[in-house]
Amino acid sequence: MKCRKRLDPPSDTSSTPKNHQKSHECSKCGKSFARRSLLLTHRKVHVGSGSSEGLEGEKSNSGNEAKGLRSSPRLKPYKCEDCDLRFGQKSDLLTHQKIHTGEKPYQCLECGKFFGRNGTLRIHKRIHTGEKPYKCWQCGKCFAQNSSLWIHEKIHVGIKSYKCFECGKCFIQSSSLRSHQKTHRGEKNEKCLECGKCFSRKSTLVVHQKVHTGERPYECPECEKRFVYSYELQSHQNWHKGDLPHKCGECGKSFLTPTHVQIHQRIHTGEKPYKCGECGKCFSQKQHLGRHQRFHTGEKPYKCVECGKCFGDKRGLQSHHKTHTGEKPHQCIDCGRFYSTSSALRTHVKIHTGEKNYKCLDCGRTFAYSSCLRSHSRIHTGEKPHKCAECDKCFARKDTLVMHQRIHTGEKPYKCLECGKCFAHPSTFRMHTQNHTGEQPYKCTECEKSFPSKSKLRRHQKVHSRDKSFQL
């Protein structure tokens, strides 16, 4: 597959002109540009991408003649014996030969990295100093390299010179086109050594690897929240500033980006465009579908670097990290109890408010949590999706299956600190500890007699019901 490049080379002149005035005007549309090279590139929009029609007047023949002279062997006497490239100056040849020898004599004193050219080292140092000398005169954005500015300016020019002949999609950079072409070929050369997952681009692999390391290098100075990507931090900081320019027309809620508004509006429309191929369940967001699909595949890509435990989603790993740090930043204002996550606090608060928003349509019973309603509804449907791999017995709830499996494994995780006796179920353990404490929390409303367990109270209450039947 051949893809044709249709760009003028970047200008050799500085990208930071002394005269800030946009003196080069397009005769077709009147748009002005700071540099002549940008005007030439822009005019391709009018005459057709890749065409040179109408540009002859803007280009001088002397440039082509000079190019021919520069390529002459007489004016480029210094030849590389390894690859036959020719150079006009001996110093250029010596610099080029370092590519073949692998020599990198220039070292960065900040990070120790080596470079083959002094100029490359100077550009690299700007990472440490934060220097960005090349400014876009269209929007004011600054760049560390002239080449980065030149690529950026194409956004304002409105031209995408690299076209994919498979699907017709156009790109600003040739590297973006090459990466895109891999999607047609199905080529995924970049492999993650942790999980074996493959990617078509190295940059995507680098981003993916942060899933395994848990690395979040970007920290918010306001609230110390950390992020994987710089753009996430920037969006988050706008939230602190209250800069939420995009508004939902239905409820008036504001968001950082138009995309966030579109996703939010699915709450109002009920749209769920992402469907699971395994079970047919639909989701409003693609990331929610991806998280759900891991239940089917058993994939757990998020690994704790402290203990090696793996999780199916990022939130699970973040919550788990707090078990190592002991961090519990969320406090209940009613009872003062602390929780490691805001969701755990919201769940707890319902104990104080008595809030039960989830109603069973079959029997009218209400529940505080959607998970409790789902478990309850299986009483009506008879569904028992959780199957024991040992004896094929099925259960309506996963926690019931986990407790049942202890019959096969012999596991008894609940140990009494008083006598050392172990138990498989928490309810049995609680009943046993009451023997040591003498606690009898279950009280009969008829005679005020107390009992250590609910089952003993129910058995006792039958005495009162029999007495009432005899009286009748």
Image: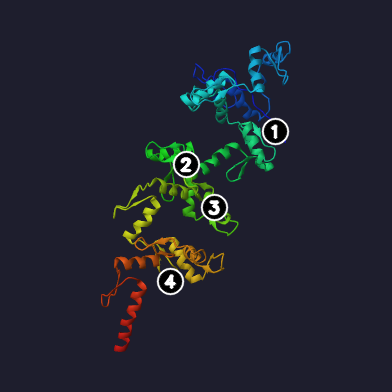
Q: CA distance from mark 2 to mark 3?
A: 22 Å
Tell me the mark number nearer the camera, choosing from 4 and 2.
4
Q: Which residue is mark 2?
A: 257
Q: Which residue is mark 1?
A: 3
Of 444 and 39, which appears nearest the observer?
Answer: 444
Indicate the secondary structure of the residue bearing disc 2: loop
Q: CA distance from mark 1 to mark 2?
A: 34 Å
Pointer 4 local density, CA inside 10 Å: few below 14, some 14–19, many at least 20: few
Picture layout, residue 233 above or below residue 351: above
Q: CA distance from mark 4 to mark 3?
A: 31 Å
Quadrant where the N terminus sits is: top right
Q: Which mark is residue 363?
A: 4
**Residue drawn 47% across the image and 67% down it:** 377
Q: Residue furthest front?
A: 419
Q: Give coordinates of residue 357: x percent, y percent.
A: 39, 62
Tell me the mark number nearer the camera, choosing from 1 and 3.
3
**Residue drawn 48% across the image and 40% down it:** 215
Q: Which residue is mark 3?
A: 289
Colour approach in the figure:
rainbow
**Residue drawn 38% across the image and 65% down it:** 429
164 relative to 14 in the view: left or right: right
Q: In the rendered structure, which amino acid carries the disc numbered 3?
A: Leu
Indicate the secondary structure of the residue bearing disc 1: loop
Indicate the secondary structure of the residue bearing disc 3: helix
Q: In the rendered structure, which amino acid carries the disc numbered 4?
A: Cys
Q: CA distance from mark 4 to mark 2?
A: 43 Å
